[in-house]
Image (tube, helix red, strand yellow):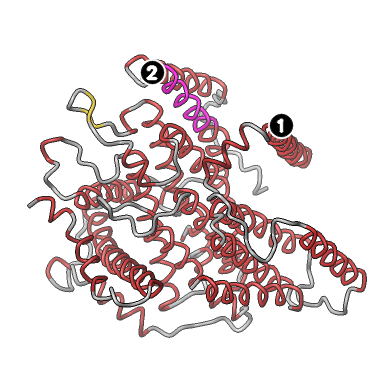
Amino acid sequence: MSSVAFALITILTLAAALAAATLQNLMHATLSFAVTLVGVAALFFLLGAEFVGLVLVFVYVGAVAVLIVFTILLTRRDLGKDRGANFWGAVLAVGLFGGLTWAILKTPSVAIVAPHIRALTVKRIGEALMTGYVWPLQCVGLLLTAALIGALVLVMEEKR
Amino acid sequence: MSKSIDQIFVDAKHWLLSWLTAAPGWVVQIASSLISIFALLAVFLTLFALMSVLERKILGRMQNRYGPNRVGPFGLLQPVADGIKMLIKEDIVPARADKMVHFLAPIVIAAAAILALGIIPYGRNMTPFTIDGGILFFFAVGSTTELAVFMAGWGSNNKFSMLGAMRAIAQMISYELPLIITVLPVVMVVGSLTPDRIVAAQAGYTLGIVPRWFVFTPWGATAFLLFFVSGLVESNRTPFDVPEGESEIVAGHMTEYSGFKYATFFMAEYIGMFAITGLAATLFLGGWHSPVHALEFIPSYIWFFAKLSVLLFVYIWLRGTLPRTRVDQIMNFAWKFILPMSFTCVIAAAVWHYAGRGLRGWLWSLFVIIFVYAALSILLDTRRKFAPRVYRFAE
């Protein structure tokens, strides 16, 4: 059952990722990217990490994809006229893929036989965030607040 | 006796599944999901049909006219006629539209709306899909609506559609924040994101009379009001229907849709409304619990749908009463008033918890809320006198 689901989700995710990388129309590529993210979230669900999957949909599909879409809308005038391969982009992509593969193969816990992991409940994540990782959490919060205030300042300048 | 009526739908599902005892586990799992999905769709599509005619009748009553009264007794068969009309209408796609995106937008929007229904407990043991982070699931699914609205606006290749989509996304993103933050106090107090646990935490009665619903605490009442207003904005209902304001931008992101696609948008809007009112009832109004101990013999799902109907009636009532707000008014209201008040609810809930959850906590949290409310009303007072309007952006 779960291996069939895994195969279906993986095919969908890979197809969407391929579409996101190859489609000529930039807007279509962005929408396929959103589908890819939903697929990845579904994989997390399959692994029992519901919280991570939900946050992925929440943040990336709900906010980041909308942000990308607006960026394209506000900056590009000639949608769909983007042609020709990007050499450095390909190099970067292959490099990133290689690096990630190396990191995954080096990690001992993700061996072929999955180790027994305790179910990742929201409660455990919350406890970890509020005890062991409280400083990183606060730093991220500070950074985001600074970004928010920065955006506000930019808008205020324009108004005058 | 009352027990068996209360569990009649659960027993029916078990009975249906008992035919499959010989089948492998995954067949049973899929069949169980399919039964839940089918029941959900049947109930809520019927409710959608009913709601569409009742809304028009009630609005008619409020505006001193009859409303639909030609088809069937009291015009109750109007949705059937509407459905047939919508189905046989010509499906027009603009020549310059992005065909694929234009086609997919109503599907995505309807799917997101229907998915959100899955986590709400409709009665005792009647949650279609129990997941650990149910509340989070609701909002994660709801947040994909924004992308779907954008797809509709952009795919239509029409300036009114695009403007409508921009407005819709702006107000949905602004109000998603208070919507989620007003849920936080409930989650904090219960200590769980599972809707079933939240409903279970509201069981019982204080002094045997007042039910232990969160709406009867100061922070709960405030959070409920804020949640209700934010939900109104999220479902683009009338005082906040700027994205599809007929007098300004035709029909917003739905301008270029006709026939069944338009009906799908319409359905998604109503289903979204049911979902958000259902969540409001679950979080603050005790879910399927009965308000009086003596009336507990009435089945739990009847109580849930009674609460849902009351909230939906308020939606219609507001639509019949209030004029449309301006875009800047909506935004100012969100960021300057609703957001600080929702943070106050979180603090007030913490105060309530640490002051012992009794009368003392009740009074202290009331104090916190009144204090912040008074401070906000002093701070936000523009001291503007009513004078002839100056339009700064239309010069």
- Where residue B364 appears, as percent x and y from the top left, is 41, 16
Q: Which segment is the magenta one?
A: B340-356
Q: Amino acid at mark 1?
A: Trp
Q: In terms of secondary structure, where does tag 2 sit?
A: loop
Q: CA distance from mark 2 to mark 1?
A: 30 Å
Residue B69: assigned label: none
**Residue in the picture at 18% in, 68% down:** B75
- The residue that appears at 38% across and 37% down in the rendered structure is B224
Query: Chain letter of disc 2?
Result: B
B272 or B19: which is nearer to us? Answer: B19
- Judge from the rendering whether residue A147 lies leftward or rightward of residue B172; answer left or right: right
**Hey, what amino acid is under mark 2?**
Gly
Dot 1 falls on a residue whose secondary structure is: helix
**Which residue is label 1 attached to?**
A135
Say which chain tag 1 marks.
A
Q: Main secondary structure of the magenta part?
A: helix
From the top left corner, tell me how far across and down residue B232 is, in percent: 42, 48
Above or below, B252 against A147 in this view is below
The answer to whether residue B353 is magenta is yes
Of all residues, the one furthest to the left in this rendering is B1
B106 to A48, vertically: above or below: below
- Looking at the image, residue B19 sits to the left or right of residue B384; the answer is left
The percent coordinates of residue A39 (x first, y second) are: 60, 67
Residue on which disc 2 sits: B356
